[in-house]
Amino acid sequence: MDGKIILVDKPAGMTSHDVVDRVRRIFKTRKVGHAGTLDPFATGLLIIGIGSATKELSKYVGLDKSYTATAKLGATSTTEDPEGEITERNGFDIPEAADIEKALDEFRGGYLQTASAFSAKKVGGKKLYDLARSGKLEGVEIPKKQVEITELKALKYEWPFLELEVACSSGTYVRALARDIGVALGCGAYLTELRRTRIGEYSIKDAKRLEEISETS
């Protein structure tokens, strides 16, 4: 299996490193890596390299990606996902479908995105989520990056849940996009579900669940 690339459909509740550990046990090798982290609550496509293929993983990291996502409007989260401290908002008008489209227009094509405070982005050699968890974010300038949003579609909207389809450049935080859509709507928002469906030309349709993977895969 040395030199093999496999596509894995990561389940919710596992870290990307958990998946790597499972694949190590399946193929009985320590030399396993992945191209692009998914948060524990997220599901979907992970590109896994085994043996010498780990040297190739960097070429997949910078590829464009696609996601389906569900945001809950009318509330915010300290981590911008279900794992943080949730605060319900009030004092706003419930957005209509036209309001949703107007807000999404602000991000279609791309925008200058402030990274998620609970992300692996490094500032001064330290990961933001480590600083956030230790209460040391005060005075830290959170990095911003111009991201490209090539597709942003409302798939379904039933208050307070908004289902989205997103195609974006590498390095885009979909959690931060949901946060910013909530700001644009004036009601707040955080992600409740996130599924990565594509990395470059690689599709979730071709991925296997962990229980389907064996040494002969």
Image: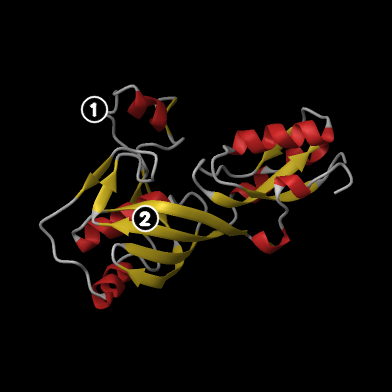
Give the x, y percent position of residue 67: 52, 60
Give the x, y percent position of residue 68: 49, 62
Give the x, y percent position of residue 37: 56, 42
- Asked if 64 appears above or below 58 in the picture, the reply is below
Give the side of residue 175 with respect to residue 34, left or right. left
Please state which of residues 212 and 124 is positioned toward the viewer in this rendering.
212
What secondary structure is marked by label 2? helix
- Asked if 116 appears above or below 188 in the picture, the reply is above
Give the side of residue 149 with respect to residue 13, left or right. left
Please name the residue that numbered disc 2 is placed on.
Answer: 177
Please name the residue that numbered disc 1 is placed on.
Answer: 138
The numbered mark, 1 or 2, whose residue comes first in the sequence reads 1
Tell me the kind of residue under disc 1.
Glu
Q: Report the label total.
A: 2
- Asked if 93 appears above or below 216 in the picture, the reply is below
Tell me the kind of residue under disc 2.
Leu
Please state, as top left, top right, bottom left or bottom right, where the N terminus lies in the image: top right
